[in-house]
Amino acid sequence: MKLPVSTEWLLHCATSLAQLEPGATASAAQLADYYDLPAPYLAKQLQALVRAGVLSATTGPRGGFRLARAASEITLLQIVEAVDGASTPYECREIRRQGRGALPPEECRSICVLAEKMAGAHRAWRASLADVSLADILAELSAHAPERTRSRLTGRT
């Protein structure tokens, strides 16, 4: 499975926003500068997290993005699905029914074993991401990471 590069961007941006003081925000421009990313495209991607209820956005001189809920309530799966959707990456086209190797219809009444295994792998991947919150990620960062992120991202401590 290959995810778009914007998935990495948003996972890191959400983690950075989770390190800010309560109520603090960071603009798309600040996040883009922090990670050396194209600001207009990042701003568009951040809006996907707003639509998904992961982030909230405010306008004005102190506006920007912040977590819409507690970090413990936001999973990696929610972030990934906001960008990439929830559809399975594998689509069985039943080629076992085609060509010289075509199976007879009576042998194709149940789901293809390969489709079944791929669906199981996708469910396991989703469950793994659903089990990890932003708070879990923060707990694994070094003790000085939040202060460093706050000072470099917003210029405030």
Image (spheres, rainbow, N blue to C red):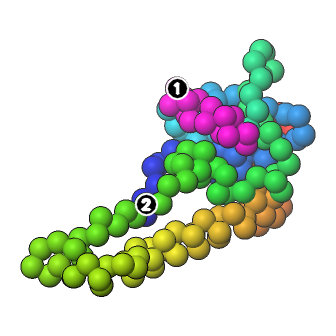
Q: Residue 32, position in %: x, y?
A: 59, 34
To which quarter of the image does residue 77 belong? bottom right
Foreground residue, 149 or 44? 44
- Residue located at (69% from left, 34% from top): 50
The amino acid beneath tag 2 is Pro
To which quarter of the image does residue 10 belong? top right
Q: Nearer the viewer, mark 1 or mark 2?
A: 2
Q: Of helix, strand and loop, which one carries label 1?
A: helix
Q: Residue 94, position in %: x, y?
A: 28, 69
To which quarter of the image does residue 57 belong? top right
Instruction: Report the side of 131 relative to 33 (left or right).
Output: right
Q: Is residue 141 visible?
A: no
Assign the N terminus to one quadrant of the image. Answer: bottom left
Q: Compared to 148, does 155 lie above or below?
A: above
- Residue located at (67% from left, 57% from top): 76
Q: Is residue 46 magenta?
A: yes
Most extreme residue toward the front, as rendered? 106
Marks 1 and 2: CB-CB under 8 Å?
A: no
Foreground residue, 151 or 141? 141
Q: Of helix, strand and loop, which one carries label 2?
A: loop
- Residue located at (85% from left, 48% from top): 70
The stretch of residues the image draws in magenta is 39-54
Q: Residue 108, position in %: x, y?
A: 31, 79
Query: Label 2: which residue?
Result: 89
Majority SS type along the magenta span: helix
Callout 1: few (<14), some (14-19), or many (20+) C-alpha neighbours within 10 Å? few
Query: Label 1: which residue?
Result: 40
